[in-house]
Image (cartoon, grey):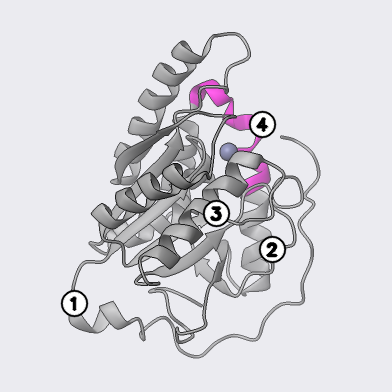
């Protein structure tokens, strides 16, 4: 989308002295299981592709869980064609990032948080044994995004808050609203890789939305004194700050 950036502006933050050395998993030198949940193919890549690429570069395991296959995402084709095309594009995007793709098999535009769906989603997340799970911010204009946030939150609770819950933003000011980040990740080095992964979603015409996200990266970067950043809300009740590896 070519519209002007509608990101709320914040004062630049003071530079934090420590850079992400305090994550509990980091001291064990163990590979972390990082999960990113997105409602549709292209959401995880645009929301946090740069951060996911950093985890992968550091040897951690990243799995992208697509709640749907983007069945409603093509105006000129039916849901079966859209599903096939967008599944292939998601697989390609994950290949470019070095992530594993998992499909949770809900339907684009018809996602649900009914009890059975929560149980299925919780079982899926449990099977992936996450240390960290990224998901949509719950205040979003797209119902599928809100449902994704709720499913992840419910799984987090059902699994005893056994992993770190981290929210990402998409098209802030247009889709995500009222998002005040408490974590910034420098994505200067992985931004080109993120761009490639976003542009793997050819049928979605990334020129409509990538430039907006690129501008968001610069704006978030300026808030954190970085060239480019992705910003997150880390649920911090029991977590130190900085918490994530690479956190500024
Ligand atoms: Zn979406």
User: Could you tell me residue 16's position as x and y percent?
Assistant: 55, 87
* Label 2 SS: loop
User: To which residue does mark 4 refer?
Assistant: 208
Q: Is residue 8 above or below residue 62?
A: below
Real-space Cα separation, disc 1 to disc 3, in angstroms = 32 Å
Q: Nearer the viewer, mark 1 or mark 3?
A: 3
Residue 150 tag number: 3
Q: Nearer the viewer, mark 3 or mark 4?
A: 3
Q: Earlier in the sequence, mark 2 or mark 3?
A: 3
Q: Nearer the viewer, mark 1 or mark 2?
A: 2
Residue at 65%, 41% in the rendered image: 143
Real-space Cα separation, disc 1 to disc 2, in angstroms = 32 Å
* Label 4 SS: helix
Q: Residues within 10 Å of mark 2 (few under 14, many from 20)?
A: many
User: To which residue does mark 2 refer?
Assistant: 179
Real-space Cα separation, disc 3 to disc 4, in angstroms = 27 Å
Real-space Cα separation, disc 2 to disc 3, in angstroms = 16 Å
């Amino acid at each position: 989308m070519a519209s002007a950036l509608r990101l709320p502006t914040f004062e630049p933050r003071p530079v934090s002295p420590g850079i992400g050395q305090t994550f509990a998993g980091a001291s064990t030198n163990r590979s972390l299981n990082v999960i990113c949940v997105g409602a549709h193919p292209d959401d995880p890549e645009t929301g946090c592709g740069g951060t996911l690429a950093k985890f992968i570069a550091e040897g951690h395991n990243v799995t992208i869980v697509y709640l749907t296959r983007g069945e409603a995402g093509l105006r000129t084709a039916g849901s079966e064609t859209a599903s096939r095309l967008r599944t292939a594009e998601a697989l390609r995007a994950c290949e470019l990032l070095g992530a594993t793709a998992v499909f949770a098999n809900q339907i684009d535009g018809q996602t649900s948080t009914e009890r059975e769906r929560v149980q299925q989603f919780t079982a899926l997340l449990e099977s992936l044994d996450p240390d960290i799970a990224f998901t949509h911010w719950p205040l979003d204009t797209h119902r599928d995004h809100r449902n994704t946030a709720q499913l992840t939150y419910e799984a987090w609770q059902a699994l005893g808050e056994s992993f770190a819950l981290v929210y990402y933003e998409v098209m802030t000011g247009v889709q995500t609203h009222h998002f005040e980040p408490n974590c910034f990740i420098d994505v200067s080095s992985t931004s080109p890789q993120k761009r490639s992964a976003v542009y793997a979603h050819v049928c979605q015409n990334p020129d409509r939305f990538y430039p907006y996200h690129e501008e968001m990266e610069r704006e978030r970067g300026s808030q954190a004194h970085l060239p480019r950043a992705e910003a997150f809300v880390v649920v911090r009740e029991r977590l130190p700050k900085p918490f994530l590896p690479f956190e500024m």
